[in-house]
Image (tube, coloured by chain):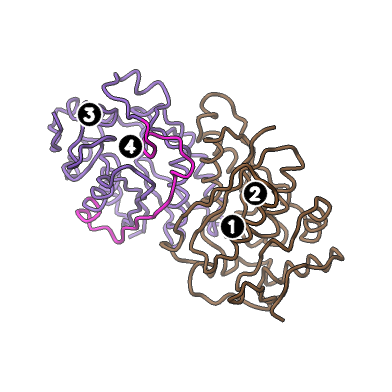
Chain colours: A purple, B brown
Amino acid sequence: MKNAVILLSGGLDSATCLAIAKKKGFTPFALSFRYGQRHEFELDSARKVAKAYNVNDHVISNIDLRAFGGSALTDEIDVPKDRDDDAISDEIPVTYVPARNTIFLSFALAYAEVIDAKDIFIGVNALDYSGYPDCRPEYIESFQTMANLATKSGVEGNNGMTIHTPLIQMTKAEIIKTGTQLGVDYGLTHSCYDPCDDGTSCGHCDACHLRLKGFDMAGLADPLPYAD
Amino acid sequence: MKNAVILLSGGLDSATCLAIAKKKGFTPFALSFRYGQRHEFELDSARKVAKAYNVNDHVISNIDLRAFGGSALTDEIDVPKDRDDDAISDEIPVTYVPARNTIFLSFALAYAEVIDAKDIFIGVNALDYSGYPDCRPEYIESFQTMANLATKSGVEGNNGMTIHTPLIQMTKAEIIKTGTQLGVDYGLTHSCYDPCDDGTSCGHCDACHLRLKGFDMAGLADPLPYAD
């Protein structure tokens, strides 16, 4: 059993990613971040998913991206609502957090080195979120190249660090079908950018829109409650 | 005047790096980290250096590398003392923090994106610290490649992010001579891995050893007080 670091946001994609890593036989170590999100529901979901999958350890790392500003997820900018698919996929969204995946993968790299893991799983997706530069395959490849030059294992000639992105070319519907086959309980996950005070999903932000459309296209019901 | 992010540790190298960035005409924005160091003296020095250089802004970002363990700088491992040059340069030191420069540069990348800077300065040095994989030129080049794929500016075709490493091929003596010519007050900086309670440098850890040897080779006096 090889150790692997799984970046776990509490969302649908990363929960599926964790299930895939388990299925591939890795011993999962989950890593989540408290990075100035406006709500804690994401982390509650990450904890529930980590527990459901009996991960070997779950580290929640505190980092402060608010110091730099620049995103609706961490600032007081309004989250866009009821946008159509083209608007979501063609531009870099206001919810973009500068260098977020780079920062998350960098922490995963540190964690991997400490637990002697050569494998990192991240649930990025190039189709639904084409506006995020750090979700593209060429970005992930360049991160992997850099990671193997950055670390002890790279220096010692053991160039084995692999960044796994099993979802990168899947549609949301394919992700949901794959996870459902692997037994993922999507009722534990959280996607909404702008939940109600009780954690209920808004149903109108880009994340809710893509999630609901994904379940619809997969012919499955989303177990989450929505505000309307 | 172009904005630049300067990674500022409070040490001799990063202070010199800041002076070089100013000399090159950049408007400096300094970035330091509270990452679980065992002492705050480094950050006190970073603040003093930032103030002396009248930087445009100085962000101190809180990140928690202790969650992963693995280093004498953040754990309760003994800092090695009185090692000779070969021992310092030939192996990866116990003070190595996994993926530290990758994490620091990732935050610098986020900061750069927010302040619309295309230039990041980091005072890494490949000669004195050859044991650190993330101080090598090939690592820095790969980070720059990745950075230009990770960011909005990369997607928008403006592949202009540059990671500047003006010290990378300098000896410590050359760094000190360069900084002295630029008017750096090295009395404001801090290098020691294991200072006394009052902040006085120990004079025996690898960082003190390299610093003292650097001043000696440069034919200059280190303005810092030492414990003995």
Residue A50: x, y in percent?
25, 54
- The residue wearing badge 2 is B122
Pointer 1 residue: A155
Q: Amino acid at mark 4?
A: Leu
Mark 3 and mark 1: Cα distance apart in space: 43 Å
Instruction: Provide the secondary structure element on which disc 4 rests.
Output: loop
Please, what is the three-letter code of the amino acid marked with disc 1?
Val
- Using the image, tell me which numbered label, if any, was put on residue B186: none
Instruction: Label 3, secondary structure: give it.
Output: helix
User: Which-is-in-front pick, marks 4 and 3?
Assistant: 3
Binning the other alpha carbons within 10 Å of mark 4 as few (below 14), some (14 to 19) or many (20 upward) gives many
Image marks 1 and 2: residues in contact by CB distance under 8 Å: no
Q: Give, as a single range, the part of the protein colored magenta.
A: A49-77
Q: CA distance from mark 4 to mark 1?
A: 30 Å
The label nearer to you, 3 versus 2, is 2
Cβ–Cβ below 8 Å for labels 3 and 1? Answer: no
- Which of labels 1 and 2 is toward the front? 2
Q: Report which residue position mark 4 lands on.
A: A167
Q: CA distance from mark 1 to mark 2?
A: 20 Å
